[in-house]
Image (spheres, rainbow, N blue to C red):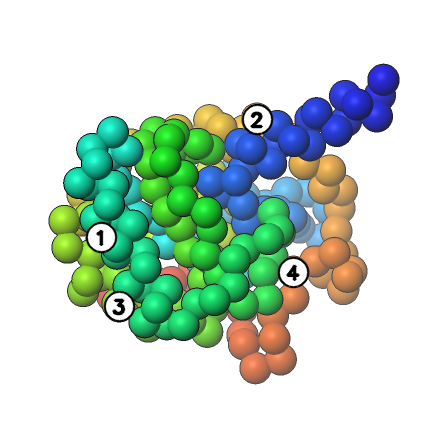
Amino acid sequence: MKFFIGLLAAVLLYREAAAHPSLYPPPRRADGSVLCEDAQTEAQLESIPYHSYHIHTMFWQNNEEHTKGAERLKERLVTHFNITNHCTSLFHQNTTCYFETDYSPAGPFLVGQWAIYVHLEDFAPLAQWISQHRGIYDVLIHPNSGCAVRDHEDWPFWIGTPWQIDLKVFRHYKMPWGPIDPASPEYPKHGPSTPPYTQRTHRLMRG
C-alpha cells in the first residue's frame, strides 16, 4: 500500500510540476539551513547562483487563433535555434530543450503556455530573439536558483504585459532535499567554462 501511495504522489507531483519542471535543491548556508526567502543582503544574494532559465509564452487556450499563433511562435524559435531535444526530467538538463505545450492551466500558470529550458550559455541569444519576435504574446523569463517562489516573484522579468500566476503551488511541493554539499553528485553542476550566474549577472543583463 505504501508503494502505491508513494507512486501516486510521484505522479501527482510530476503532473503539477510538468509545466515547470526544473527543480533544484535550494541554496543553503554553511550550517545547512535554506537561504531563499530571507536572503536580503548583497552578500547573501550574490551567493545564490542561477543554474538555468525558463522562457514561458502565455496564450489564451480557449482562443483557437491565439493558440495556433503561439504554436507557430514556438516552432519558429526551436527551428531558428535548432532545439531538437525534448526536456525529459524534472531536474537539471545538460542542454537547452523544449517542454510539451500546456493547453490548460498547470503548475503556477492560470492559462495555456509553452516553455523552453534555457542553458546558461544560450540565455542571451534566446532572450533577445523572443523579445524581438514575440509579436502579440507576453513572455515570462525567470531564473532557476532553487528558490522557486523568488525566482518567479522577485527575480523574473516580463516582456510585454505581466500575467497573474499562482505562486502558492510551489509551497505545496514536499521535496526530499536534505542538507546538500555542493561537492555532492546531487548538486547541479556548471560546465567548466560556464561561471555561475548570480543576482549581479542578472541585473547587468537586464540593464
Depicted 67 relative to depicted 135: above or below: above
Badge 4: residue crowd in 10 Å (few <14, some 14–19, many ≥20): some
Kindly identify the amino acid type of the residue bearing the numbered disc 4.
Pro
Q: Quadrant of the N terminus?
A: top right
Residue 131's spot in the image, x, y percent? 22, 61
Badge 1: residue crowd in 10 Å (few <14, some 14–19, many ≥20): some
> What residue would you read off at disc 1?
159
Depicted 151 relative to depicted 46: above or below: above
> What residue would you read off at disc 3?
128
Work out which residue is located at the far top of the displayed protein and give it: 1
Which circle's residue, 2 or 3, is located before the other in the chain? 3
- Tell me what residue is drawn at x 37 percent, y 72 percent: 81
Image quarter of residue 92: bottom right
Which numbered disc covers residue 188?
4
Kindly identify the amino acid type of the residue bearing the numbered disc 2.
His
Which circle's residue, 3 or 1, is located before the other in the chain? 3
User: How far, Cα to Cα, is label 1 from label 2?
Assistant: 28 Å
Can residue 136 be seen here?
yes
Which circle's residue, 1 or 2, is located before the other in the chain? 1
Residue 78's spot in the image, x, y percent? 37, 64
For label 1, the SS is strand
Q: Quadrant of the C terminus?
A: bottom left
Q: Nearer the viewer, mark 2 or mark 3?
A: 3
Q: Could you tell whether 136 is left or right of 153 in the image?
A: left
Which circle's residue, 1 or 4, is located before the other in the chain? 1
Q: Are marks 3 and 1 in contact (CB under 8 Å)?
A: no
Which numbered disc covers residue 184?
none
- Tell me what residue is drawn at x 21 percent, y 36 percent: 64
User: How far, Cα to Cα, is label 1 from label 4?
Assistant: 28 Å
Residue 11's spot in the image, x, y percent? 65, 31
Q: Are marks 1 and 4 in contact (CB under 8 Å)?
A: no
